[in-house]
Amino acid sequence: MAKREVTISVHPTSHDTVNIAYYSVSSSYPLSNGYTDSDSTTYGQVGFTRGANAETYVYYKFDFSSIPAGATIKSVSAKAKGVSSVTSSSIVATRKMQLATGTTLKGSALTMSASATEQTFTDVGTWTREELLDAGIRFYTKRKSSNTSTNYNLRMYGATMTVTYEIDEPDMPVRVKQNGAWATPSKILVKQNGSWSEATKITAKDNGTWK
């Protein structure tokens, strides 16, 4: 059985419509504007929830359904871009972006600034395929007890998750035509330095690379 590594990168394609909290969504910048890679210049925008210590959050969701069952997750990396229109510690207690499976947070959070800057997660935690099937990113702010009704905005520009996984692939049999019918030979002989010997390995060129 051969092993093959596959690397895929995806961006959010939806958002959790149940686990959300905000005052309003901008009609000019709907949440779908943030279904993009982390280097995007478009964004979705919501208004901070009003009230003392009020929380605002949106979970954007990734689609990793293409990862086959039985795959072994080798590595996960991620980038994101989010903006809090206010960064003063006297107004906003927390302004974070963090990966999640469902609503369970993974790894360490990144702090959002007031400028649109792509950031890389240095700690994404460990992931299984099942967790990746519910992968997302939470954009989150929490007010302090002051400025409870002032309008502030949370902008979500998008995110990118890159996953490398390994899958088992059955060894491909070599078939030859014998007496008009295709058959799998028990061994293959090659001529080397004038002598016939049994081949122990067969390689093929794929996109310019021998495999």
Image (spheres, rainbow, N blue to C red):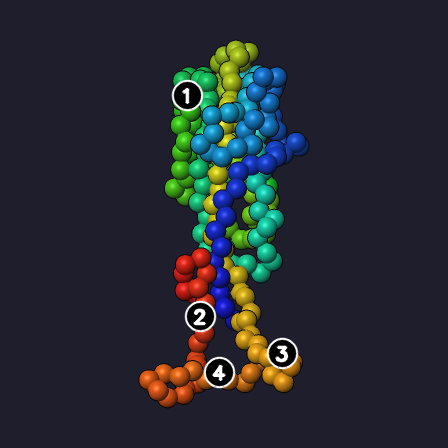
Q: Which mark is residue 182?
A: 3
Q: Amino acid at mark 2?
A: Thr
The answer to which of marks 3 and 4 sits earlier in the sequence is: 3
Of badges 3 and 2, the one in the foreground is: 3
Above-or-below relation of 170 to 19: below
Q: Amino acid at mark 3?
A: Trp
Residue assigned mark 1: 114
C-alpha separation, residue under disc 3 versus residue under disc 4: 15 Å
Q: Are marks 2 and 4 in contact (CB under 8 Å)?
A: no
Picture quadrant where residue 39 is located: top left
The answer to which of marks 1 and 2 sits earlier in the sequence is: 1
The answer to which of marks 1 and 4 sits earlier in the sequence is: 1
Please, which residue is most extreme toward the left here?
A: 193
Of badges 1 and 3, the one in the foreground is: 3
C-alpha separation, residue under disc 3 versus residue under disc 2: 21 Å
Residue assigned mark 2: 203
184 sits to left or right of 75: right
Residue at image coords 37%, 88%: 195
Residue at image coords 43%, 27%: 112
Q: Which mark is residue 188?
A: 4
Q: Amino acid at mark 1?
A: Ala
Residue at image coords 41%, 64%: 210
Q: Quadrant of the C terminus?
A: bottom left
Q: Are marks 1 and 4 in contact (CB under 8 Å)?
A: no
Picture quadrant where residue 68 is located: bottom right
Q: Which mark is residue 46?
A: none
Q: Amino acid at mark 4?
A: Ile
For label 4, the SS is loop
The answer to which of marks 1 and 3 sits earlier in the sequence is: 1
Q: Position of residue 133 (x, y in %)?
A: 59, 47
Residue at image coords 44%, 17%: 86
For label 2, the SS is loop
